[in-house]
Image (cartoon, rainbow, N blue to C red):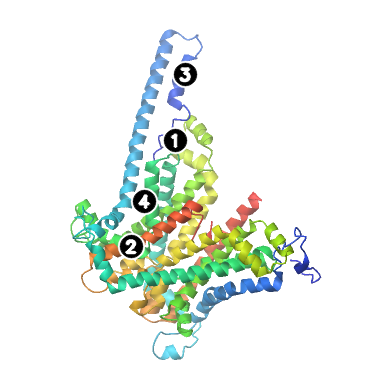
Amino acid sequence: MTPPPDHAAVPSASDAAPVAVATAPAGPPPSDTEHRRREAQRAAGREGARRTVAQIGFYTFVSLVLAFFSLPLLWLAVAPFDANPGLSASLPEFTLQNFQVLWDNPYAMRSLGNSVILAGGTGLLVVTFAALAAYALSRVRLPGRDMLLYVLLLLSSIVTGTAAMVPLFNLATELRLIDSQLGVILVLSGGLLPSAIFILKDFMDGTPRSYEESARVFGASPFQIMRDIVVPVVRPGLATIGVWSVAQVWGNFLIPFLLLRSPDQYPAAVVMYTFYTEGGQANLALISTFSLLYSVPVILMFLFVSSRYGFRFHGGIKR
Amino acid sequence: MNGSKGRPLAGAPAGRTGGSDAAGLGRRRAAGFVAPAMLLIVAFLLFPALWTVYLGLTDYQLTGFAAANPQVVGLENYDRALGDDRFSNSLVLTLQFVLGSAVLGQAVLGFAIAWLMRNRVGALRRTVEALVLLAWILPSSVITFLWIALLDRDGGTLNALLNTPGTAWLLEYPMASIIVFNIWKGAAFSMMLYAAALGNVPPSHLETARLAGAGTFQQLRDVVFPRIKGHVLTNLLLISLWTFNDFTPFLLTAGGPENRTEIMPVFIYRIALESGELGFGAAISVLMLLINLVIALVYMRLLRQRKDASA
């Protein structure tokens, strides 16, 4: 690891050395002073050389990091617009023809629609149920509340899709939810709800109660208060939870892969996988444009969430 | 909790006291508000976890006689796992995967980027962070194809760059490939966490250490590390948990070639859903749940300690 060139703020050792020489007492003979000055110069030279080496190290490292992270991504940026897309990233012969291929594929566009259904359905369910639960938990002292929240959070980080794929598959079979989008939505909602409740409760704890109190004085019912006062106040929190759930579902591969059987039900994540694993020569025009179209919403959602909150939470556990 | 039934929850507009049930919800209705969420959580989170434990004690099969009539076989599945080479192979690979890609790879690379970029502003830092983040947020089935294209034997960019034509990375170095892939995919979280943590290290302390002649390593050990210990532990626990539960390598290698990348999630999938041995798969899942439980408990304890310390 190399130190970064950040010595602008405070003078470093190399600047300090000559100062020490200049303020040295007049006592020692001139030859000694001369000797010390040379010594200091040499030290400064060494420090300068060290700094140059550090600079070179820094830029080498940064270039390597940039190369490492951009190399796989290059293909995604180039291939969709290449008339003859290959597997390696190269300068494209520009075309939009590939998007026609995408449009003509019966599974591609439908799978994006399926992804919207799964993500939208889950998002709606999670936001609604989490908001109700979080509000009640924030405002009413239900017995065992703190313990409940603790256990919920623990559960959601332990019972992941991978660790629970066997019982989830069995459960869906028993409930006749195999090959049903509702099944995928319910399973995913169950997994996302604990974190959503936890985050929203935090959010609601931080909002003032006085509006609700005055509305109540004027005779509003709890549901009116919920709809007309609480929801507008916590809307940014609800939006964040909504986007977060949608993003989690949009990229999720395992649960729909596990529970859905017929190709016309598959969301984009699973169709993408079938595009390159099933049946002969991979259609790169199709795969590249599909990847791009499928990725764009994620990038937009990421920009939305990070512009609001930064990435404070991810996966099952809030940081 | 205030258990006295005399407490007029529904009729206390004075507000400031106790639970401050501002909207006059009352306990009964509050419970009704919590119920739908709890129903889903119990059905699709709690119940599956408990059911796994039961299934792990049976010889349940996807098809055939044992599918209709599963028998409780006690600890037989666990006994079988202990003597199963494929299971121990999976255990070793999982350990390699978690240690190599998360604990070493993501954490070290993430820290290195955060450390080197800590005083930078402007285009360079934004570009680096955007690229690292992009790898993290793109859908897993997209990035796996990007890596398949990158590592392809004939047309891949990597072989063209390294001038190693005909190297089939995913077949010749499968484990190394998924480890590097997972470092690439997940370094963003560590980078962001350490960037936030390094913000808590006063620059003056680093400066003092440097004036005293401390090298980079000494600065990191004596000044930086003591201040970000909590973050380091948090980071290692979380990325280990996520990497341990990551199914994405399946998309890249499907556990092959010859089970050489059969980490535990992939092992469970192939045993339970491809071979149909649901009981045996469930028994392995119980082990996964237990490992998850240990990691999560340590993490929650850590969070609580920090909360107590700051309160």
The amino acid type of the residue labelled 3 equals: Val
Which residue is disc 3 drawn over? A19
Dot 2, crowdedness within 10 Å: few (<14), some or many (≥20)?
some
Closer to us: mark 2 or mark 4?
A: 2
Q: Is residue A139 visible?
A: yes
Q: Position of residue B251 (x, y in %)?
A: 33, 67
Name the disc covering residue A293, or none.
Answer: 2
Left of A301 or right of it: where is A88? left
Q: Nearer the viewer, residue B4 or A216?
A: A216
Q: Is residue A270 visible?
A: no
Q: Position of residue B191 (x, y in %)?
A: 44, 50
Closer to us: mark 3 or mark 2?
A: 2
Q: Secondary structure at mark 4?
A: helix
Name the disc covering residue B131, or none.
Answer: 4
Label 4 lies in what chain? Answer: B
Query: In percent of the image, x 40 and y 34: which residue is there?
Result: A5
